[in-house]
Image (cartoon, rainbow, N blue to C red):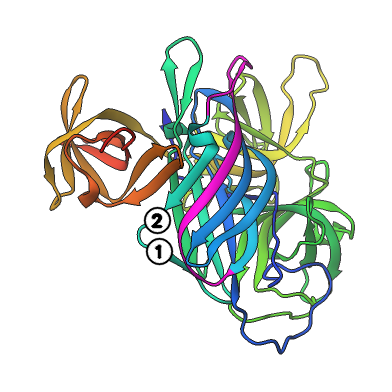
Amino acid sequence: MKQLRFLRPLRLCVLLLTSAFLISSCGGGGTSTDPAPATGTVLFLLTDAPTDELSAIYLKVTEATLIGGNGQQTIFSGNKTINLLDLEYYNEPIAFGEVLAGDYTKIRLQISDLELVDKDGRSTFPELPANGKIDLLDQGRFTVFPGRTLVVEIDIDANKSIHIVAAGKGTYQFRPVVKVNIMDGGLPDKLARFEGMVTEIYDDPAGKFLLCAADFTDVCVVVYLANDGSVFDAEGMPVSFADLQVNDFVVAIGRYLQDDTNNTQNSGVDEKFAFEAIVIEIGGTASQVKGSVANSPDGNDQFDLVTEKNTVITVQLQAGTKIIGKDGELDRSALVIPQDVEIEGYVVAAVVAGDPDTLRAALIIVDDGLYEEKLSGIIVDPLEPVNMSFVLATGIGDRCVALNDDALIVFISESTDGTQVRIGTFTDLNDGQSAEVYGQSGVVGCFLASDVVVDLTGQP
């Protein structure tokens, strides 16, 4: 099974609802003499580390709530269906809303449906534990400060959450393994994706425009084209920023810019969270294609890609094509056999039947992650907190397990009131607990674990 430690771009199918206008409504502006707000805002991002066993995982989120001293604060209520397998390289916001400032102890997600689609197109609908109620608990408490934004990244790890319980029969069990990363006063340093309509283009500075979200036209972000940024037209050809027009539908890929001051500059809207784009695609016509590099780029800046569907497509590198890996921008030397990549660009159908289609590349994401192994068993003595290791009794014998310095320990318990997912520490591990560990086999000695999942269901 493949697990990626990867810089995941942030995909915005935006639900941004905030009277604080940290990401501003179109139009308006000006200054305010109101007293300091008694509310803050919370942004929920959803991401995933997908499984290779399925072709789609459709999850429907109906509610997202904060629970704490101020009671329950609902951030989102509705119906939002997400294909988790689209989030291998992307994060997608599921809620952005205003809540009372204060301390909170729990995040509650309510999901109503889960559809798993296998490689042959067959769908199954696993039973949701505790009627789909999932409570996420971080260590201690977390605080929403007045006038500030708390970013909560929720990683529903499909690789660890979905289990085949009857081999060969397509029977699955869903046990949510969810990790929570809470960031006060900042945003993830990841690529972001924002789709919408251009509503205004500014003269100063050049390369600045207002982009309003595709699904929520009253939610807008000021976008700056990066100094080395690229613009592509509706047929995937490189063009200049001057070709961008008001009312164009575009996809902007880049990073958020954060400024603690209330900065309206020349746009008339709050630019506390602006956006710097490294790629702008006009028209929304681009496709995303995953596959493996079949040959290095030739003198025409072309190479073949064997896609996930085992077809071949010719990739055309262009002036302005961005190649991105986990550590930042790369050059064409990263495109070697059999490198896995995801390519965003415009597909040109072959003129001659039987010839491969051509993909004009705007963005290439290089999958330079690691394969992750899994061990299952029961924790037994000795547990050694000094070197963060323990013995795991597996079906084929005992294995020494040593945790990496940044290893995540997740505890899951289930009751009629819901499923609780809690981030724990090494001292919470005990003899007799059922655990799954994920990581890499060491050259010598212990299995090196990056994640430990402990299922407390049925334990006293």
Tell me if residue 257 comes above or below residue 94 in the rendering: below
Residue 292 locus on image (x, y percent): 54, 29
Q: For the stretch drawn in magenta, what is the main secondary structure?
A: strand
The residue located at (73%, 79%) in the rendering is 264
Write the start and end of the magenta stretch as one range: 100-127
Residue on which the image places disc 2: 138
Q: Secondary structure at mark 1?
A: loop
Cα gap from disc 2 to disc 1, whole angstroms: 7 Å
Q: Quadrant of residue 100?
A: bottom right
Tell me if residue 406 comes above or below residue 290 in the rendering: below
Q: Is residue 331 visible?
A: no
Q: Quadrant of residue 298?
A: top right
The residue located at (50%, 49%) in the rendering is 154
Q: Is residue 80 left or right of residue 135?
A: right
Residue 429 locus on image (x, y percent): 22, 44
Q: Is residue 417 visible?
A: yes
Tell me if residue 60 comes above or below residue 270 in the rendering: above
Check the picture and name the quadrant holding the N terminus.
Answer: top left
The residue located at (34%, 34%) in the rendering is 457
Residue 354 locus on image (x, y percent): 75, 14
- The answer to the question of whether label 2 and label 1 lie on touching residues, with beta carbons closer than 8 A, is yes
Callout 2, which amino acid? Asp
Residue 414 locus on image (x, y percent): 40, 37
Q: For this rendering, which residue is in front, 252 or 456?
A: 456
Q: Which residue of the protein is positioned furthest toward the top in this rendering?
A: 168
